Image (cartoon, rainbow, N blue to C red):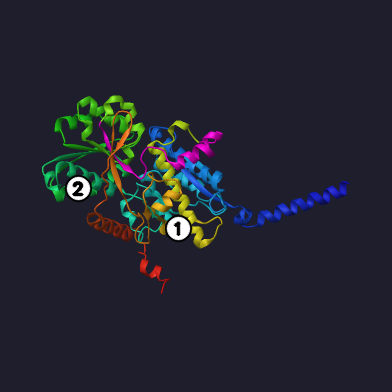
Amino acid sequence: MKFRATLLAAAAIAAASSAALLPATSAFAQAKEQFFPLLVYRTGAYAPNGVPFANGFQDYLKLVNARDGGIGGVKITWEECETGYATDRGVECYERLKGKGPTGATLVHPLSTGITFALTDKSFNDKIPIITAGYGRADSVDGQVFKWNFPLGGTYWGAADMLVQHIAKKEGGFDKLKGKKIALVYHDSPYGKEPIALLQERARMHGYDLSLLPVTHPGVEQKATWLQIRQNRPDYVFLWGWGVMNSTSIKEAVAVGYPRDKMYGVWWAGAEPDVRPAGDGAKGYNALVYQSPAGQGRVHQDIFKFLHDKNQGTGDRKEVGEVLYNRGLVAAMVSVEAVKRAQTKYGKKPLRGEEVQWGLENLALDQKTIAALGFTGFAEPISTSCVDHEGGSVARVQQWDGTKWIVGADRYVADQQIIKPMIKASASKYAQEKKIAVRDCAKELSGGK
């Protein structure tokens, strides 16, 4: 018996040794899993906004597993990593998670323009797509230079342009903007600085006076900024904040008597955590709506049925349907749809990032698809290409009535005659500085002929 046990032990050791010599990917050869790294911030000054987004994103991944059995039969797996909205921590999270799963990271949502800038330089070697839905580098719309970046559905240049269009309409035309004063209160980071170039271009075109008022991270000290606003009395204030900065800005506007109905936030400054802390003082405040307004539709009913009714929801049931929760849902949905699209070319199996890149570059989310997914009223169509990694952008303006958001009927589309030349110039400059070969999209479409 001892001899037989010895032989069995020796065989086990030999088998283990042989397995250890196999390539790392062989150990996962049979694993049908698609891994998503989740960069989040559930702590710190940005947690009020980061938490509902992360919960919505994760709930959608859970829903696809529970309701659909994964993506084409491939189970979704994920792991969160806390960035605190800090660029260095975001890069550390990315490096730790990018190689996980049988095929490595599927794609990454940096959830920070600063982290996006850092990861963009890495993307050309790592070949992992970067989705910056409604944020990130505006010039990354140009897929000929930024092969791995996808600012799906909107950029900050587009957002700034839409806000100028909106106030021009209120004033009775662009010519009425001459001599008006617009103040940009912005987070002093790559995020907050992104809209400046567009606002300056529009100022040259229409003759309004633009004042730039940076707010230092995390944005809780703004008294000096709002004393300037009280002194200068701008006609409009554009708010490019995040986290506690947004509610602080509204509170300071109340303190100096600046009308909230003259304040317009970017779509990251237009959620429930931005207005509720200011109480009645937030009434009349405006912000852009990107992709998903507050509310519930068929997809939310599925989330209740498959997750929350079974105590499998990620966060509080009460937050389902709030602005940032819904935006997290949409961000996860477009990610899943990119993998589905890639599966039509590469098969229903775990896909590498460079394969998912093709799916992202060939997205065709029309109203029929959106309806089939249960997102009617909570997502706008996106149609990407090699040249265009944004896929279209539409926004509306919503106003806080003291208890809920009222979404306006007017739909705005950014003026591409202004933005496209800016994108081309900025992307070309990046390509020259980084010595990146510009893609020939026409040649790629023809199969390299």
Query: Which amino acid is tagged 2?
Result: Gln
Residue type, numbered disc 1: Gly
Q: Residue at x 23, y 25 (%)?
A: 255
Residue 126 visible in this rendered orientation of the protein: yes
Quadrant of residue 113 in the image?
A: top left
Residue 142 part of the magenta-drawn span: no
Q: Relative to residue 69, is residue 408 depicted above or below?
A: above
Q: In terms of depth relative to the viewer, which is nearer, 433 or 170?
A: 170
Q: Residue furthest bottom?
A: 449
In the rendered structure, which segment of residues is drawn in magenta?
A: 284-313
Q: Which residue is mark 1?
A: 359
Could you say whether the residue bearing mark 2 is in a helix, strand or loop? Answer: helix
Q: Position of residue 130 (x, y in %)?
A: 42, 51
Residue shown at 39%/54% (left/top)? 366
Residue at x 44%, y 31% (from the top left corner): 318
When the figure is inspected, residue 286 is found, relative to residue 130, above or below; the finding is above
Q: Quadrant of the C terminus?
A: bottom left
**Front-most of residues 311 and 126:** 311
Q: Is residue 293 magenta?
A: yes
- Residue 67 x, y percent position in the rendering: 54, 45
**Counting residues from the N terminus, which is met first, the one under dot 2 or under dot 1?**
2
Q: Secondary structure at mark 1?
A: helix
Which residue bears the numbered disc 2? Answer: 200
Q: Residue at x 24, y 44 (%)?
A: 163
